[in-house]
Amino acid sequence: MVQSIVIGAGMVGLATAWHLQERGVEVTVLDRAGVAAGSSWGNAGWLTPGKAIPLADPTLWTYGPKALLDPDAALHVPFRVDAALWSFLARFASHGTHRAWDRTMAALTPIDKIALSAFDELLDGGVDSWTREGPFVIGFADAAHSKGFLNEIAGVIRHGQDVPFERLDDPASLAPALSEAVKVIYRLEGQRFIEPAPFVEALAASFVARGGVLRTDADVASITAGGHPAAVLSTGERLTADSIVIATGAWLPRLARPLGVRTRVQAGRGYSFTVATDEPAEHPIYLPFQRLAMTPYQGRLRIAGTMEFRGPDEPFQARRVQAIINQSRKLLRGVDLDNRQDEWVGSRPVTPDGLPLAGATKAPGVFVAGGHGMWGIVLGPATGKLLAEQITTGNVPAELRPFNPLR
């Protein structure tokens, strides 16, 4: 029987493993920490293809310099000598043009269009979880602050997505947690959300129930090519298979770079926590000007934010949580920001050009799946399905071609 090894038990890795099973492959998933132990755990859980857009845009040139001087800004870069980081930031910023935005959006749109149906396929195939429709409530303290959001939505629509939205006169019934300081509010439809960790855990359970092997004590030190590729663990154990998929998020370069994947993957760390609310939170809330995302989560409200460019294994920075709190206080009401639970930091894998890395490496039989930035949750199942097709047939689906990891 054809065998495959997938390294990484987050959304992308497990979705790839699940779809390889669909194609008759015997799969082992290896992870050094556990299911959803990385950025799949504490994110906002948004299934929003209408917001799966390039991270760099022309506003970066005005927002970026201000953010570097504002300790409460969503974008945070530590001031230190780090040539690799500053080289990444220079290349990332070079994509902050209208032309680059349109080029990247054109590449993302085909996979955005199939993202939600890929979740339906998992659920129909036995993954015991759920996705929930919006609406998403989008709020601004001032009409001038909405310009960037409206331009983004217009760009997404221009590239062929259907993103229904309308301005609301009375948001109280949809988002009682918003204070009177939020004066301009939109309702965004056609998107969904999940509780990310429970969903990924259900995906792992389905994978195992279908005969998959899941090892969460396996730290892969290297990959060897030639004949059948092999994953070599830090213990010295050597596991061979017909194919290997590297889906290790922000840690992807450690294994993939020796195999010809030269595109830098930088950890863009996000922070989140949950709070109690006076009135139950039923709908996701987005405050684009402050870059704050909020989602109902197990009876509480998860608040997520920040794009912090640090190493993926650096310590939790409590100051980033405080920045989220400082940005939230005037815009929320009936929310206990001083009694937080589930404080978390996760390392999202960001590429300079804003495109994922999904496809074959230079090593025969070795593939990568990662570099989705903030969109690994929403695009993970579609990426896994398309990559499984490429691995088993040798054909590269059209949606994956812009994501060639050897570009």
Image (cartoon, rainbow, N blue to C red):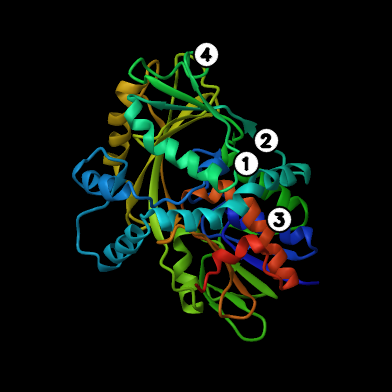
Q: Residue tagged by mark 1?
A: 199
Q: Nearer the viewer, mark 1 or mark 4?
A: 4
Are dots 3 and 1 in contact, CB under 8 Å? no
Question: Position of 190 compared to 330: left or right?
Answer: right
Instruction: Please tell me which of labels 1 and 4 falls first in the chain.
Output: 4
Which residue: 27% across, 63% down? 86
Are dots 2 and 1 in contact, CB under 8 Å? yes
SS at mark 4 in the image: loop
Q: Amino acid at mark 4?
A: Ser
Direction bottom: furthest residue: 226
Q: Residue tagged by mark 4?
A: 173
Q: Residue tagged by mark 3?
A: 18
Alpha carbon separation for disc pair 2 and 3: 17 Å
Instruction: Please tell me which of labels 3 and 1 falls first in the chain.
Output: 3
Which residue: 63% across, 79% down? 229
Q: Nearer the viewer, mark 2 or mark 4?
A: 4
SS at mark 2 in the image: loop
Q: Amino acid at mark 3?
A: Trp
Callout 4: few (<14), some (14-19), or many (20+) C-alpha neighbours within 10 Å? few
Q: Residue tagged by mark 2?
A: 130
Alpha carbon separation for disc pair 2 and 1: 7 Å
Q: Nearer the viewer, mark 4 or mark 3?
A: 4
